[in-house]
Image (cartoon, rainbow, N blue to C red):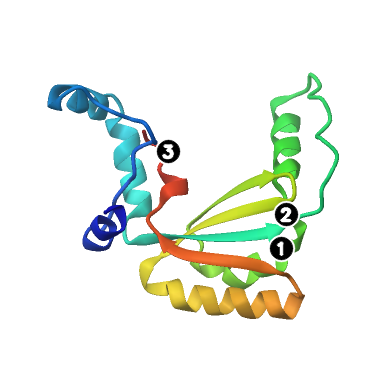
Amino acid sequence: MMSVLWRRTPALLPARFGTSARDVEDLRAMVRARERVIRRRLRAVRHRAQMTIRLVTPQSDPPPAIERSSGTSYLRSRQREQAVPAFTPLRAAVRRWIREERVEKRPGVASIYHLVPRGSVERYRSALVRAAQEAGVRMIASGPFPPYAFADAW
């Protein structure tokens, strides 16, 4: 159902799994409380699709304990934790279509989510596959999907 609605509308945000409202008034109150964020996210996903790339990554040691440091140091360490070096040449090949990127790393797998213009999905996919072959990177690309990874408004 979500995919059908997404194809028919310029912008759609899925609600967080398990979100429920007692009645219409409860739903209105939920939307009102998050209206600014919802509007901003709707603008971001308008006419865009989510593409998902999965890469097998080396199993690594757990990240070191967080030390007291500056906010900048903390953010840099988080950025390093989310880095996926094998994806760097692939990102370069598709950068022109990426509007937003989210990265999730779990032991042994990295998931990279891209928000791309709906009309560019095939060009994005072709460039991504070509870059992966040239770089010798094994990956699985799927999509287009509604922007599940970019629906943080709810």
Q: Is residue 77 left or right of residue 110?
A: right
Q: Nearer the viewer, residue 136 or 1?
A: 1
Q: Nearer the viewer, residue 26 or 67?
A: 26
Which element is circle 1 on? helix
Amino acid type at mark 3: Asp
Q: Pointers 2 and 1 in contact (CB under 8 A)?
A: yes
The residue where tag 1 is placed is: 88
* Relative side of 73 to 96, left or right: right
**Could you tell me the amino acid type at mark 1?**
Thr
- Residue 95 percent location from the top left of the image: 57, 66
Q: Secondary structure at mark 2?
A: loop
The 10 Å Cα crowd at callout 3, few under 14, some 14 to 19, many 20 or more, is some
Q: Residue sitting at 66 percent across and 76 percent down?
A: 131
Three-letter code, disc 2: Val
Instruction: Specify whether 95 is left or right of 63.
Output: left
Real-space CA distance between mark 3 and mark 1, rounded to the nearest whole angstrom: 25 Å
Q: What mark, if any, has residue 84 been given in the picture? A: 2
> Foreground residue, 43 or 31?
31
